[in-house]
Image: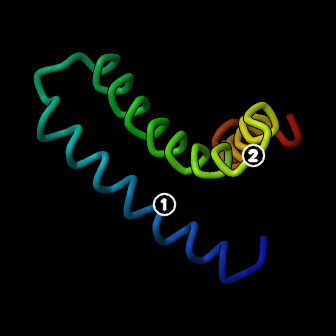
């Protein structure tokens, strides 16, 4: 990914996460950790689905886009998991 797009992804992704964490803390403070996690993950996945939906409407293959997204998710999680290339 070119540097400009990576900078955008890093900056906006962090902003989205901060908003999601704040809302989760404010609106779901009575929920269990698992329920809060599930709701926050659901919100994040809805945002991903909205981005992918734009491409799918333009004729892109949904399965390929989901696979592409899963590869990036694994890449982003590598530092936390200690695994490389899984």
Residue 41 in the image: above or below residue 30: below
Quadrant position of residue 83: top right
* Residue most extreme to the front: 58
Q: Position of residue 24 (x, y in %)?
A: 23, 38
Position of the N terminus, as image quadrant, is bottom right
- Give SS at disc 2: loop
Position of the C terminus, as image quadrant, is top right
The answer to which of 81 and 36 lies nearer the viewer is 36
Q: Which mark is residue 13?
A: 1
Residue 16 in the image: above or below residue 11: above
Mark found first going from the N terminus, 2 or 1: 1
Foreground mark, 2 or 1, reads 2
In the picture, measured across the screen, residue 77 lies left or right of residue 25, that is: right
Quadrant position of residue 15: bottom left
In the picture, measured across the screen, residue 30 lies left or right of residue 45, that is: left
Distance from Cα at disc 2 to Cα at disc 1: 26 Å
- How many numbered discs sit on the rendered protein? 2
At 38% from the left and 22% from the top, the residue drawn is: 38
At 49% from the left and 36% from the top, the residue drawn is: 45
At 34% from the left and 17% from the top, the residue drawn is: 34
At 66% from the left and 75% from the top, the residue drawn is: 5
Report which residue position mark 2 lands on: 59
Q: Quick check: marks 2 and 1 in contact, CB under 8 Å?
A: no
- Give SS at disc 1: helix
Q: Position of residue 8 (x, y in %)?
A: 56, 75
Q: Position of residue 3 (x, y in %)?
A: 72, 81
In the picture, measured across the screen, residue 60 lies left or right of residue 41, that is: right
How many neighbours does mark 2 have within 10 angstroms: few (below 14), some (14-19), or many (20 or more)?
A: few
The answer to which of 53 and 20 lies nearer the viewer is 53
Q: Position of residue 42 (x, y in %)?
A: 41, 29
């Amino acid at each position: 990914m070119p540097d400009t797009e990576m900078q955008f992804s890093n900056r906006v992704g962090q902003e989205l996460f901060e908003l999601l964490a704040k809302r989760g803390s404010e609106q779901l403070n009575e929920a269990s950790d698992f329920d809060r996690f599930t709701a926050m993950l659901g919100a994040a996945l809805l945002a991903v689905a909205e981005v992918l939906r734009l491409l799918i409407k333009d004729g892109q293959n949904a399965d390929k886009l989901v696979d592409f997204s899963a590869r990036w998710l694994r890449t982003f999680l590598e530092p936390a998991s200690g695994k490389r290339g899984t």
